[in-house]
Image (spheres, rainbow, N blue to C red):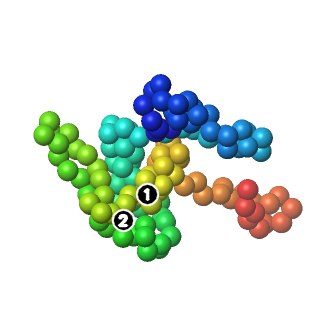
Amino acid sequence: ATGFSSGSVIAEDLREPAFMQDLRAVNLSVIPFKFTNPTKKALVEKLIVAIEQHLITFPEIDELIEELESFTYETTEFGNIRYTAPEGMHDDCVMSLGLAVWGLGSYIYAPLRRPELRRSKTNNRIDNI
């Protein structure tokens, strides 16, 4: 959802990209995420918690691992935290993983439920529900 300034001709074109119609046509839902410093901070901090608490796993993709290892933060002159990639590096993989975690909502914190076991009435074996 992050785009150009309002009133821009390009911003008007990006308000509803053509691919959105294609996604709707196949019954997919897309929730826009606007990158601002506060939303990026919330996204990154949720990702940090998810990784630290082993709530997620992710593939060992070299670019992703490199970005995660080098990802950093800086404190602004007003004392705010700003998450960023080091100069000359990218954070696309980190942000993609962050968006995936963000999309999980509160489900990421739900405990895994084991299937309940029940005894079969016809014979004394246990069946999974």
Q: Position of residue 67 (x, y in %)?
A: 36, 65
* Disc 2: which residue: 67
Q: Position of residue 17 (x, y in %)?
A: 62, 39
Q: Taking the image as drawn, is residue 108 in sight?
A: no
Q: Earlier in the sequence, mark 1 or mark 2?
A: 2
- For badge 1, the amino acid type reads Asp
Label 2 CA crowd tier, 10 Å (few <14, some 14–19, many 20+): some
Please state which of residues 49 and 75 is positioned toward the viewer in this rendering.
75
Determine whether label 1 and label 2 are within 8 Å by CB: yes
Q: Position of residue 66 (x, y in %)?
A: 36, 70
- For badge 2, the amino acid type reads Glu
Residue at left 54%, top 55%?
112
* Disc 1: which residue: 92
Image side of residue 51 versus residue 27, left or right:
left
Report the residue that reaches farthest toward the top.
Answer: 7
Q: Is residue 49 above or below residue 18?
A: below
Image side of residue 63 versus residue 14, left or right:
left
Label 1 CA crowd tier, 10 Å (few <14, some 14–19, many 20+): few
Query: What is the quadrant of residue 31 in the picture?
Result: top right
Q: Taking the image as drawn, is residue 114 in sight?
A: yes
Q: Quadrant of the C terminus?
A: bottom right
Q: Is residue 76 above or below residue 127?
A: above
Please state which of residues 77 and 108 is positioned toward the viewer in this rendering.
77
